[in-house]
Image: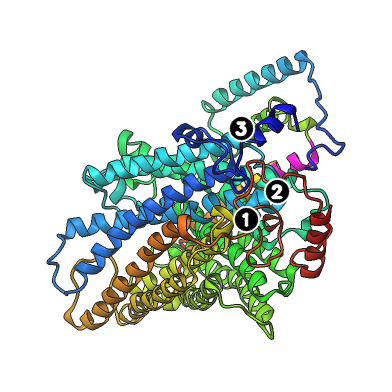
Amino acid sequence: MNDHHGHAPTHHVTPLPVYFAIFFALMILTGITVWISRVDLGVMNFPVAMAVAIVKATLVILFFMHLIHSTRLTWVVVLGSFLWLGVLFVLIFSDYLTRAWVMY
Amino acid sequence: MTPSTLHDVRFIEPEKTRNYLNEDYGVFSWLLTKDHKRIGILYLLSVTLLFFVGGFFAFMLRLELLTPEGDLLTSDTYNKFFTLHGIVMIFFFLIPAIPAALGNFILPLMLGAKDLAFPKINLLSWYIYMTGAIFGIYVIVTGGVDTGWTFYTPFSTQYSNTHVFATTLGAFITGFSSILTGLNFIVTIHRMRAPGLTWFRLPLFVWSMYATSLVMLLATPVLAITLFLLMLERTLGVGIFDPALGGDPVLYQHLFWFYSHPAVYIMILPAMAVISECVAAFTRKKIFGYKFVAFASLAIAFLGFLVWAHHMFVAGISVYSAMIFSFLTMLVAVPSAIKVFNWTATMYRASVSWQTPMLYVMGFIGLFTIGGVTGLFLGAMGVDVHVHDSYFVVAHFHYIMVGGTVMGYLAGIHYWWPKITGRMYPEWWARLSALLIFVGFNLTFFPQFLVGYVGMPRRYHAYAPEFQVLNVLSTAGATVLAAGYILPMFYLFWSLWYGRKAGSNPWGAVGLEWATSSPPPKENFHVTPVVTWDAYDYPAFLKAMRETQNV
Ligand SMILES: [Cu+2]
């Protein structure tokens, strides 16, 4: 078996203060989510809420799920998964966004 | 060897060599096994059982359709029977059949590995599968479900008063067994290859299984989420698909087919995997255009994700979107065609041996091609509007799933039967059953193309009298087909005791699974094999085998 040929995954230990800092940032962002839900930004309501959510998800994936110190293969897997989510969204919206364009 | 095993060896009769079957005895040595070969057998037994459950429903449908009047089954019972036929066959037979039964057994052997990367997760996947199957059986026993295997909303969420919740929960649970199998295969293929077994030396079976596993891993979670949302809306009234609650019923179809079109490739890619191995073994040639066939598997897996809305052309989706999906559907035919042409090119001017697996290969190639080409008819928007929800569609997907996947599955069962059991199946009986299946299949499903094209809709228990002749032919075919499927149950069982001893490589084929004894020892190989030959390189492989024997 070639399951031990040299490059064992390096175990990077994230210092505890980093975890607390990320946790703190997530709490602040949650506060922002709650706050902007009470402010009317017009058409920007949805984009802003999604932007905050994306920042939060990115922090969780990078630090709590250790992506930032992971191998390139792990990055490929994660980015590939989002690519697939992109396929789902783009093609579904190719229906919803053009449904009203009548051609006859 | 430690002294104690040396001591034990003296008490073993020479002909009863140790293998995975006689290593341990007793029910728990099977139910708690972590051996991929035994788990493969557990899967083999379970999918076979469920195949005959699904087959029972199919046979009852065909009996009802013998006459135009709805006289054998009431319309409600008929609805339940076609639903249960679809659910049992797709979720509990076709999806796990080749990967989880044959793949489980063969893949580690092909890689020269002792087991899959995660043996306990492998066993867990079987228990998850069985849990899902028990939900299925529970539904069958307690009154059934009538939504069709697709669980379309709003019928499934608002109107059906049958066991929608238990059925979708069963399908939801079973999905996880397929995710775990896919994960296990991917990690095993990446990490457990024998020394010297580089990516381009892998048998094409492995490439195809790799592509299948990617689809399992990327598509199945979407089915899980979709069915979960369906259960939430049905039980708690969470508005996802119901317009009155701010939802959209067509969204259900988008999400469902995002899984279920790729699921067709979860069923057909493993069959293609088997076909590649059999073509190489029975033509004694390297597969023509190895790299094209290998990458065609990955291309099918990828493109298969971009075509799902061809199931929804008449569901009210945007015409522009439908045009995109129609175009992409044409594209997915290209890699499938590459495979068919390359298999045929391999056979060109080869001296083909016509053992049973090769008969199934020929069946596969012909029937899959018919299924594929009629799929292009259906992918063309105009034709689809005409034949949508007719028997034309039913015939098309049975040519793919039965003509393709089941033929591939039976080819694989016969091809690896000597490896799995150490015994040869009886060739004459096996050829007879292959012939019965081919004739029975075509007689069952070809008339359905015709009757569908002239307008017989699917999913009704009664029909217009002018359709009767074609339906009688179809039911007659189903009877022949049933005989063809039951026959192997007898001769394969018989061969366990009375079949000729197989030896390690009865076909003279190339591949690491043929480089170990039949049945293989528990640890697969006594010494870790070192691969020095390319895939299907007969002279190099046979030379390497002779050298190991001399050592
Ligand atoms: Cu499709």
Dominant SS of magenta comes to: helix
Within-10-Å neighbours for mark 3: few <14, some 14–19, many 20+: some
The chain holding disc 1 is B
Query: In this figure, which residue is indicated by the disc labeled 1?
Result: B209
Can I make out residue B321 in this image? yes
Rendered residue at 34%/47% (across/down)? B243
Q: Where does residue B469 sit, x and y in percent of width and height?
A: 23, 83
Looking at the rendered structure, the secondary structure element under dot 3 is helix
Which amino acid type is shown beneath numbered disc 2?
Ile
The chain holding disc 2 is B
Which amino acid type is shown beneath numbered disc 3?
Ala
Query: In this figure, which residue is indicated by the disc labeled 3?
Result: A53
Q: CA distance from mark 2 to mark 1?
A: 9 Å
- Of the residues tagged 3 and 1, which is closer to the observer? 1
Q: Are marks 2 and 1 on the same chain?
A: yes
First in sequence: mark 2 vs mark 1: 2
Rendered residue at 80%/69% (across/down)? B539
Q: Are marks 2 and 3 on the same chain?
A: no
Rendered residue at 52%/51% (across/down)? B101
Front-most of residues B486 and A65: B486
First to last magenta residue range: A71-77
Q: CA distance from mark 3 to mark 1?
A: 36 Å
Reply yes or no: does residue B207 show up in magenta. Answer: no
- Residue B179 figure quarter: top right
Which amino acid type is shown beneath numbered disc 1?
Met
